[in-house]
Image (tube, rainbow, N blue to C red):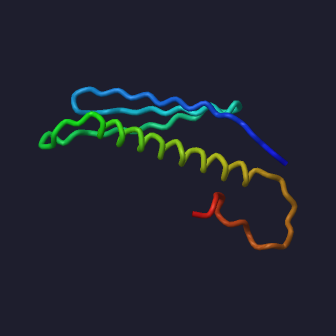
Amino acid sequence: MLHTVEWKVRLYLSEDGGTTKARVVVNTGTTTLTGHGAAHCNPADADVPEIGDELAAGRAMHDLAQQLVNTAERDIEGLDTPATGRSPRPVAGWPM
């Protein structure tokens, strides 16, 4: 069965005084989740805004990804499926 959906993702970045903050929001159509991340420039380092953007955005996306995995795991646990006598399910997710 083919299943295709589109999720809207927005990434917001702001920088103030050597600190870059990121907020990433995903709307799945039924749920909206928000991830947050930050990066701080060491005063001894050169101020390269792109690096702060990359770090803060990556951290916000990592936070969002963990929230999505946690949500999926809760959904799996909430399924009312009859016992099959099989061993417990492995941790949710795609093999890496």
| Left or right of residue 67: residue 81 | right
| Left or right of residue 25: residue 77 | right
Q: Residue at x 40, y 33 (%)?
A: 22
| Left or right of residue 80: residue 76 | left
Q: Residue at x 68, y 34 (%)?
A: 6
Figure quadrant of residue 57? top left
Q: Residue furthest left?
A: 44
Where 80 sits versus 7, above or below?
below
Where 30 sits versus 75, above or below?
above
Total number of numbered discs in the rendering: 0
| Left or right of residue 86: residue 57 | left
Q: Residue at x 53, y 34 (%)?
A: 34
Between 27 and 2, which is closer to the camera in this rendering? 2
* Residue 78 percent location from the top left of the image: 75, 50
* Residue 26 percent location from the top left of the image: 58, 33
* Residue 1 percent location from the top left of the image: 85, 48
Figure quadrant of residue 46? top left
* Residue 85 percent location from the top left of the image: 84, 73
- Quarter of the image for the C terminus: give it: bottom right
Between 36 and 58, which is closer to the camera in this rendering? 58
Figure quadrant of residue 41? top left
